[in-house]
Amino acid sequence: MLRLSKLTDYGIVVMAHLARQPERPHTAAEIAAALPLGAPTVSKLLKLLARGGVLISQRGAKGGYALARRAEEISVAQVISALEGPIALTECVLPGVCRQAENCGVRDSWVKLSGTVYHALDGVSLAEMARREEEAVA
């Protein structure tokens, strides 16, 4: 079974929350209070997402975290990659990881399948995720 980590799932929830209110930066405490997540988890996620380039961090009295680009320009694949690294169904898909890659009879199929999964995730924007979550709550 393919499964994202719980932390990545929470990261997408945090990003969707920010996508619904992109007009200003949000603090970790504010996000944690708005979502059913603990403050340490939110802080960890925000740092990872900022390091991954999908959030920006602003210091100061009016600081906090904001989307690095418009929600329509950030894909689910980018959020997952920021939290988990490259999207690949098996390690052999990643360049230079598998010593058997040159002689493997199934690697090409794994590369194709991983590409299909990546493109599906890349085809869903954060804005779409935020809308879908909003519709589910309404």
Image: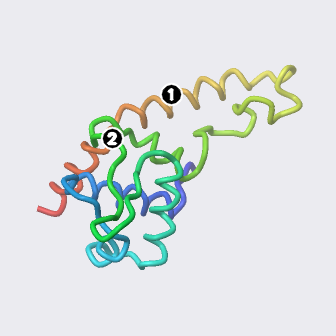
Horizontal and vertical percent position of residue 10: 42, 63
Label 1, label 2: how many angstroms apart (C-alpha)?
25 Å
Vertical arrangement, residue 126 with respect to residue 4, above or below = above
Residue 42 lies in quadrant: bottom left
Determine crowd level at label 1: few under 14, some 14-19, many 20+ residues with C-alpha closer than 10 A: few
> Which residue matches tag 1?
116
Horizontal and vertical percent position of residue 79: 45, 47
Total numbered labels placed on residues in the image: 2
Instruction: Work out whether residue 63 or residue 95 is closer to the camera in this orientation and state it.
Output: 63
In the image, is 16 to the left or to the right of 108? left
Q: Nearer the viewer, mark 1 or mark 2?
A: 2
- Disc 2 is placed on an element classified as loop
Q: Residue at x 28, y 57 (%)?
A: 18
Residue 84, numbered circle: none
Residue 100 lies in quadrant: top right
Give the residue furthest to the front: 60
Q: Residue at x 32, y 64 (%)?
A: 63
> Which residue matches tag 2?
69
Q: Residue at x 49, y 47 (%)?
A: 80
Instruction: Work out whether residue 14 or residue 4 is closer to the camera in this orientation and state it.
Output: 14
The amino acid at mark 2 is Arg
Determine crowd level at label 2: few under 14, some 14-19, many 20+ residues with C-alpha closer than 10 A: some
Vertical arrangement, residue 56 with respect to residue 115, above or below = below
Instruction: Work out whether residue 60 or residue 47 is closer to the camera in this orientation and state it.
Output: 60
Horizontal and vertical percent position of residue 135: 15, 54
- Disc 1 is placed on an element classified as helix
